[in-house]
Amino acid sequence: MARKQTRSMTQDEWDLIFPAMQGFTHLSTEIGYSVLVKGESNKEVAERVGRTKQNVGSTVKRIWDLCQSVTVESEGEKLRKVDVWLPENMAINVLKEAEKYSINQRK
């Protein structure tokens, strides 16, 4: 059985990718922010903005996919968010490397 993936990001992560969303409507970014940063459910957001749950889900997916595909400047480096499965020993090394960047320090 497939496990439902929980997608979320911090305010700092949102602020970094926001310029890449300049072609998105205000409603799309509001939907994405509500679900990804504030942690609201697709159902809650759909009811509030007058859209279907499916529309909210596809909007969130579009923003999430964008986040996975862009690089951002932070701390003098080009960074890219990744969400993949790796062998455990490799994942441990990747997580140790990621700890070097403040964007990865959950608040």
Image (cartoon, rainbow, N blue to C red):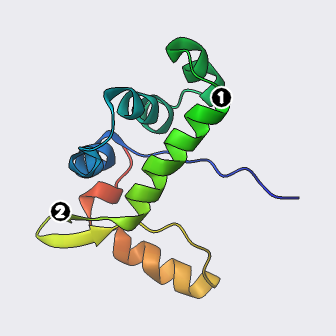
Residue 33, image quadrant: top left
Separation (CA) of disc 2 from disc 1: 34 Å
Q: Exactly how many numbered labels are in the figure?
A: 2
11 versus 38 height, above or below:
below
Q: How many neighbours does mark 1 have within 10 angstroms: few (below 14), some (14-19), or many (20 or more)?
A: some
- Residue 44 rendering spot, x and y as whole percentages: 60, 19
Query: Which residue ends up furthest to the left in the rendered image?
Result: 76
Residue 90 numbered tag = none
Q: Which badge, 2 or 1, comes first in the chain's sequence?
A: 1
Does residue 100 appear anywhere in the picture?
Answer: no
Image quadrant where one finds the N terminus? bottom right
Q: Which mark is residue 74?
A: 2
Residue located 46% across and 83% down the image: 93
Instruction: Name the spot of residue 49 as percent of width and height, x first.
Output: 50, 16
Using residue 33 as the reference point, say whether residue 52 is left or right of it: right
Secondary structure of the residue carrying numbered label 2: strand
Residue 105: tell me if it is visible: yes
Mark 2 residue crowding within 10 angstroms, few (<14) / some (14–19) / many (20+): few
Name above or below for residue 69 compared with residue 7: below
Q: Is residue 36 above or below residue 104?
A: above
* Residue 40, above or below 18: above
- Look at mark 1 in the image and give the residue it sits on: 53
| Label 1: which secondary element | helix
Type of amino acid at the residue the image marks with label 1: Lys
Q: Position of residue 82 (x, y in %)?
A: 45, 68
Mark 2, mark 1: which one is toward the viewer? 1
